[in-house]
Every structure is written in C-alpha cells, then in structure tokens.
Image (cartoon, helix red, strand yellow):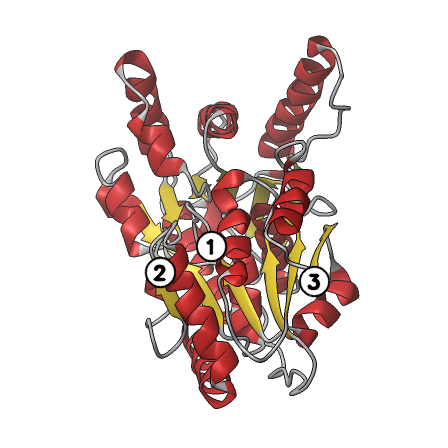
Amino acid sequence: MTRADHDDAAPLRVLMVGPLPPPVGGMATVVQNLVQAFRGRLDVRVLNSVKTTAANRPLWAGVAAQLRLLGALGWQCIVWRPAVVHIHTCSWFSFWRSGVDVLLARLLFCPVVLHIHGAQFHRFLGGLSGARAWLARRLLRGADRVVVLGAGWREVLADWADPARIDVVPNGVSVGEQVRPAADGPFRILCLANYEARKGQADLLRAVAALDGPRPVRVELFGVDAEPGRRGLLLDLAAELGLGDVVVPGPVTGAEKDAVVAAAHCFCLPSYDEGLPMSMLEAMAVGLPVVATRVGAIPEALDDGREGLLFEPGDIPALTAHLHRLIADPAAAVAIGAAGRARLVREFSLAQTSAQLLGVYRAAARPARVGRL
C-alpha cells in the first residue's frame, strides 16, 4: 500500500515549502491561494520559506535560519509523513536552496513535486555549464513531478528534466465581478509589479508620454522597490517626460488592492521576463483589458487582439498604439476585458488549476520512488 492509498477516507497530506504573504510577490500569492483552495479537501501544512532575517544580518544568522527550515522539513517528513512534498522555487539561489530540500525529502522517502515559478528560469538554466549544469539536471530529474506554468516552459525544461514527468499547471485566481470603471475623469492605467528594470515600467511611462488624445491619463505603478532606488528613478523619469499624473506609491494589498483594480480602466505589464503573472490573472478575473508583452506563458493565456493586446518587450510605439486604442474606443476596451475574463473563467480559475494540481499530487504519490537521485 502506498502513502497515497493508506486511507481513502483521509485527506491527502501535502507539505508545501514556499513563501507566504505579507511579502508582495507572485509565488507567495500562489502558495496562499493554493492553501485556501485545498482547505477542507486536503491536509496541507506550509513551511514558510520567506526571509525572516534582517537585510544587514550576519552570514551566520542567515545560515542558521536556513538550517532551521531544513530541520523542520526533515522533522515533518519523518513524523508527519506527507504523501507529497510540494516545493516552490525560482531561479539562482532559490533553486539551489530548493535542491537541498529535494534531496532531503527524497532521502526520507517522500515524493517531491518541484514547482518552477521563476520568470527568468530560462536565463538561469542557459547560464549553467559543467558541474552546475550536471547538478541542476540531477535535481530536476530527482523530483517525482516538475510543475511548469505553460507549454513554453515545458519546452525550456525538456532537456533538463524527464519530459514524461513535467506537468503544465498554470497559476489560478478566484473569479471576481466584472469591473465598471468610470466613463469620465482620467483613463487609469494600472501596473502591479515590483520596481525593477525587467518589469518595464519605464517603457510604460515613455509610451504614455507619446499619447496624444483628448482624455487625460493617470498611471498607477504599485510594487516593491526590488532594486533599491528604482522607485525614485521612475518618479524622476515621469517628471522628465512631463507626466503630471503618475503615482508610484509602493505596494498595495487586500481590500485596498481590490479598490485600485476596480477603479482602473486597463492593466499594463510591459515586462521583459515573466512566468504567468498573478497580477495579470487578477486583472483578467475582473474584466480589465490587459496590455502585456509576449513573454513567458502570457501568449498562452491571451488571444492577442481579442482577449488582450500583446507586444514585444521594448516596443514602445506598439505599446502606445495599444493604449491609444483602448482610450479611443471604450466599447472595444470593455469587449477585450470581457473576453479575457471569459478565458480566465474557462482555463485559469483557482478551482480548475487546483484540481489539476491535485492530479499531479496523486501521480507523484503513486508509487513513491526511492533512491533515484
């Protein structure tokens, strides 16, 4: 009898290793959403991997925190005996740190689901060679299942992990009510993304500066200063471009975020790298028309021209044209937003994606494989 079959009446035990809010970020939101989706259906415990030490902490403090987390993982695997250990990871240090968790869980006879979130994971893998490339392959092949966010990401991982054990499970969000933005006042462009160069907020400001229309525009950039000083640079750029209605207030969460989204006329994400952004899915869930770049799994989530408007990273004239279309044709903006919301209801609702992940758990847990690393 396998661990997954030990008692058909008992909920499957799943131990998640990943970050939880309050830090603002896509991976933390995914973990939080999954915990909520599985409540009452699975027995889920979370080892919160979010950084708890101060930024200027000594090296030993960081090492001690990681050892405590590793010890907690070992204890749960030995005492609680989860059917699946679900490890959320991204690129660079996060992947190598997660690799230690993979090794420990497998050594303790626990099946592992390794969930890849990193928007730059392709760049991370592309920069590996020699021993590091060999080790990355061993870790990826050591997981019982590898979860990626789209078919394009499956292709990226195909040379690194066993293709037969790669599962595409997109991020999912709860479906909200269709927004009804005000017909008067400025056209509000919303961007929810950390303040860093790869998110492309500077491109958005330059595109807005090139707009020439009768309706005033307000740009709202919410996020965390992931690159110190980036928020100030965006404010300086807005002033340099003569944009008078740009706000860069920092992060927004909870009911305040819901209100910000409900007041917006469109959502724009001009990133140079993405996985499948939660902020974009949240905008789709309430019917905001989306303008975004053709990166990561975004083209798999939106039919360009009907469910959203896509452009190549850095193509500021194309971004300007898309924004102009939404401003000049409110009916088209509403139709695009409604089509995007319908697509999300069909394919990216939290209920659907959590059901897909449950299938992955069952595949990983039957039968448990031992000693394959």
Query: Label 3: how many residues lie within 10 Å, few (<14), some (14-19) or many (20+)?
Result: some
Residue at mark 1: 270
Tell which residue pokes out farthest to the bottom in this image: 331
**Nearer-N-terminus badge (3/2):** 3
**Nearer-N-terminus badge (3/1):** 3
Q: Does residue 279 appear left or right of residue 244 in this picture?
A: left
State if disc 1 and disc 3 touch (CB < 8 Å). Answer: no
Residue 66 vertical placement versus 142 (above, below):
above
Please state which of the two labelled residues, at mark 3 or mark 1, is closer to the viewer: 3
Secondary-structure class at tag 3: loop
Looking at the picture, how far across and down is residue 204, in whole percent?
Answer: 52, 56
Amino acid type for the residue under numbered disc 3: Asp
Residue at the (30%, 21%) spot, across then down: 133
Amino acid type for the residue under numbered disc 2: Phe
Residue at mark 3: 245
Residue at mark 2: 311
Distance Cα–Cα, label 3 vs label 2: 24 Å
Residue at the (60%, 40%) spot, across then down: 18
Query: Label 1: how many residues lie within 10 Å, few (<14), some (14-19) or many (20+)?
Result: many
Q: Is residue 352 visible?
A: no
Query: Label 2: how many residues lie within 10 Å, few (<14), some (14-19) or many (20+)?
Result: many
For residue 154, the mark is: none
Please state which of the two labelled residues, at mark 3 or mark 2, is closer to the viewer: 3
Residue 74 vertical placement versus 83 (above, below):
above
Secondary-structure class at tag 1: loop
Q: Nearer the viewer, residue 263 or 175?
A: 263
**Nearer-N-terminus badge (1/2):** 1
Q: Nearer the viewer, residue 293 or 42?
A: 293
The quadrant holding residue 66 is top right
Looking at the picture, how far across and down is residue 297, in whole percent?
Answer: 36, 56
